[in-house]
Every structure is written in C-alpha cells, then in structure tokens.
Amino acid sequence: MIYQPVLARKKVFVQPFLVFWDLFLIQLANWRWSWQAMAINGLIVPMTTLYFLKTMGTAADQPELILSGNIIVSLIFTTMYGTSARFSFMRTFGVLDYYATLPVPKALLVLAVNAGFLVLSLPTALLTVLIGQWFLGLNLSLSPMFLVLVPLASFSLSAVGAFVGVAAPNFDAANTVTAILQFIFMGLGPVLLPEERLPAFAIFLGHFLPSTYAADALRHTLNSTYDGRFFLDLAFLIIFDLLAMVFVGYKMEWRRG
Amino acid sequence: MLNEENLTGPVYQIENLTKRYGKGREAQQERPANDAISLQIEPGEVFGLLGSNGAGKSTLIRQMVNLVAPTSGQVRLFGYDIARHPEAVARFVAYMPQKPQALLDLTAEEAIYFTGHLRGMSRVDAKREAAQLVEEWGLGEVRKKAVRHLSGGQHRLVGLAITLVANRPVLILDEPTNELDPAYRKQVWERLVSFNQIRKTTIILVTHNVQEAERVIGRVAIMSRGRVVGLGRVGELKEQIDRSVRLELFLKPESLTEVELFLARLERAVPISQGHWSVLVPRQGAEEAIHAILSGVQLERLEDFRVHTVTLEDVYMALTGQAIASEETAKTAI
C-alpha cells in the first residue's frame, strides 16, 4: 500500500494545516536546545540601544518611538537574522533535499520556518516592552492589537531574511548581506530616530522598508491611536507579508544546476 | 494527478541523461558529470550503481530524485516524466542521501515519526512504526538523544529508518553502509534483502563497498567518468571478463619498490591501495601462472596472499582499468 500524501486527501482546508503543523513542530524542535541563546541575542541589542538612546537623551520627548523602535530591533536580530541563517544553512548543507523529496509544498515550509521564528521572537518582543516601559518610565496598557502587529512585523522581517537565505550563493554571503540589511532596516526610516533627525534620503528610502511601517504601527498601538496612518501601515504589512511569502516560495528552488 | 493503482512497466526509464555543471563556455569545457546515460530499472529489483567517487553516480541519483536538473535527457518514474511531475518522486520514492543533514535537532523517533506522517501515514501508524524502527535498528538506548549527538553509525541507521518509514515502493540509498561497523553492515544488507523479497520494494543502491553489495545486487551499472561502462546482471558481467582467477597480494613495506616494479610489468596487475595489488590470471593454466607470479614476487616479501574467482570488483577493474580504491586515492590526491 502506498500512503496517500496528506495533501492529496479530500479535506482540502484541513490537510495543508496538518502539513504546516508538522513542519512547524519540526522548526520548534530545532530551537529546543538553543532557544536561550537566541532569546538572549534578541534582547541584548535592543536593550543596549535602549540604554544608549535614553542616556544620550535622543527623542526624550518620544519614549514610545524608542520603545517601538527597539521592538523592531529585537525582531530584526531574531527573525530576520534567524531565517536568513536557517534558509542558507538548509540550502548549503542539503537540508532542503529532505523536504524536496517529501510531499511538502515549498510555501508551507517557508511559512512554517517563519512561524517558528515568530514563536521565538514573541517573548523577546514582550520582554523588550516590559523592560523598556520600566526603563523609560512609561505606563502603557498593551492593546490586543499589539499581538496582531508583532506577528505581522515579524513575518515581514523574516520574509526578507528568508529571501536572503534562499538567494545568497552560500552561508557566508547570506550572513554578510543580512548584517548589512540589519543596519539598513534600523537606520533608514524613522525606526529608532524621529523623522526630523533623519536626512531626506533616509526618509525617502525608508518608505520602501517594512521596518518603517512596522515601527510606525507599533507606535500607534503603544499610544492606542488608531488613525488612517495606522491602517495604512497595517495594509502595507499584510500585503508585503503575503507577497513576500509567495515570492520566497517561488525563489526557493528545490532543484539545483 | 498520479494514478498509483496502476504502477506498471519499468520503475525508472532513463534516456540519454547528460549533466554539465556550470554555465556557457565553462560548462562546455568541463567533463560532464553524466554523459548520455540510458538505463532501465524494473520493479522489484535490487539495482546497484557502482563506481568510485567522481564517477557520476551521486549526480545520477540526484537527477533520479529530481534534485539536479539534467542538461539534456529525460527521467521517467513509473512512466511519469519527473521534470513535469515532480510529485511522482515524493509519492513513490524514499531517498537517503550520502550525508543526511535534515532533522539533526530532533530525536531519532521524532525524525522517523514526522517523516512517516508527512508521507501520509496516520499519526497513530507513524508513531507505531517509528517506535518499531527504533527498536529494530538498535536505537532504543539513544531514542531521546538529538540525532546531531549520535555517532556516525547511529546517525546513518536513523537515516535508513527515515528512508524505510511509510513503505515507499522505491528506495534509493546512497552509500547506506558508510561508517557502520561490520555487525551493523550485515544487519543493513539483510534488512534490505528482506524488504525487497517480502514487500517487493525496488532498491537502488549506490555503493563502492563492492564485496558486500555483490551479495544483494541483482543488476548493476558500472560507472566511470560520468559514463555507464557496464550494465547487466552481476553473473553476466563476470562472464564478460572471462572466467579468470584473482590473485591478491599484500606486500611487506620494506619490499614495496622491488615487488611493485615486478608487478607493474604484468599485464593485468592493478594496485588497489598502498601495498595491496590484484592480478587477474586466466583460469586455464592458472596454477602455473600463479606459481610464476609468486616465484617472481618471492613469498618472503609478502605479508599475505589470497586466490579467488572473479568478483564484482574485478569486473569494475576490467571495465574501467582501475581499482575503485585507487581511483579514490587519485581523486583525493588531486
């Protein structure tokens, strides 16, 4: 008897979820021995940035900007870096070969890897908010919208990391490109610094980066101000995430040569 | 849509398969990894791909599981062109690469379970089979350890168990007994033979462990420099290189130079490794010929010598002009 692949069975809406769930659990199993190091990595940079921005008095009148910016920094250092490293590792060391010979759609693998990193990034994002609030003397009440926005922001950044991972020629190249992108995503656009302190070219280029929209939307969430700009940010992130996932799946080639 | 109820005809039909790595002029100048390979693999057979490292066998099987795109030619699996129907590979084939790198952070049992479930088994069946395979392959004591922390041999056994789970009709195994100790190697060969005989599973083996593989392989393709230089039943191929007798000589290190000078002059003498030579002697008049060679070499210069009839390794040497081990040594030296 040849087992029918899960996806070939009749319940078309349930079966992709079952495949996704397996792939997602495999991703989580990958972190069980190393999540502590990843979490610390995701906390150190935003905490350091927070400390410097506070002590230098940068944007002292906009503590929400510092806080939202540091949540994005935390996501950049967990999800963007992590997915880039993960996908380039899978490509370079033949892990993708395993999935390529199973009845597994590429899009579900991309989604599962990114969802795995989301689970890893959520606690660090929440810790950044809690520690940041205390450090900046803020008293914010977290809106449920925060729990919608962090995944959207996380997926947009992990999709960029995944793209680098599948497109870079090797593991080292992926690491280098991601390191450069991490600074670009933090520096271009009003992520850590207010718009008035950025040069015009940085503001202009920031319009093309999901980090700008994610930081702005998070700022709105922390202030509980849901205006047109917030919904524009939200729409951008949703569309970017969907397109990016499809594009990464398309770009990720099972076959070589 | 694949029709799995009616799997008739050859398992694999490979036609004129060529693979050149690189692009443009670089690809034209390089020797192709595969060069116009055509062969057919029938249901239920144990088919061996034999050759040294760099002979093109790994490229060929990676093309057979659709991991490498051919430059030209076609691979059909149960009649489906796998370039147009890549889902056929996922549905019918279980592939074990030479160095399995996936699922290293899972435990052995988890890795087998997830693979079984993704291949379509129910959760209950996948769990049961994973537990069973862990026991059968002697992995019970390390079942809770991450695959990454297992020894090379245990890692390979996990790879084999992952390949066997969910009972795919075609198994493709790239060097399945590498890094295994003799007891485990014996167990692997026995298990594969039993799979083939009881479940009628088609098994395609890539190996350079010729002596062991010879006991299980029905038909073999011998590859050298990207080409198939011999194809047929093991017995037929042996007949092709006449009914010779093989004399193996193990030289004492202090006599290497002198003895090797003598052996190099013999027509069918081939070095296998450092101090290890093989000489093919026609069966007719073998006693005299062996006596003459041993007299020329002088027994006191030998650590050991063995005489036996033709093996698959001899077939390989006759067809390629080299011993598998010596080709590997040459490749490593490069």
Image (spheres, rainbow, N blue to C red):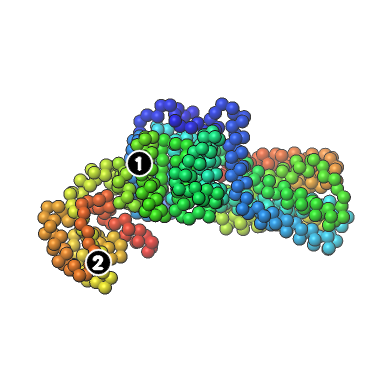
Measuring 30% from the left and 62% from the top, which residue is drawn there?
Answer: B273
Which residue is located at x 62 percent, y 35 percent? Answer: A17
Tag 1 residue: B193
Q: Against A106, is A172 above or below?
A: below
| Residue A44 placement: quadrant | bottom right
State which quadrant residue B15 falls in.
Answer: top left
Amino acid marked by disc 1: Val
Task: Tell me if mark 2 has few (under 14), some (14-19) or many (20+) residues whose alpha carbon lies within 10 angstroms of its own.
Answer: few
Residue B303 disc label: 2
User: Residue B149, how many percent across, how many down?
Assistant: 53, 55
Q: Amino acid at mark 2?
A: Glu
Q: Position of residue B317 (x, y in %)?
A: 26, 54
Pointers 1 and 2 in contact (CB under 8 A)? Answer: no
For residue A63, side relative to residue B120 (left or right): right
Chain letter of mark 2 equals: B
Q: How many marks?
A: 2
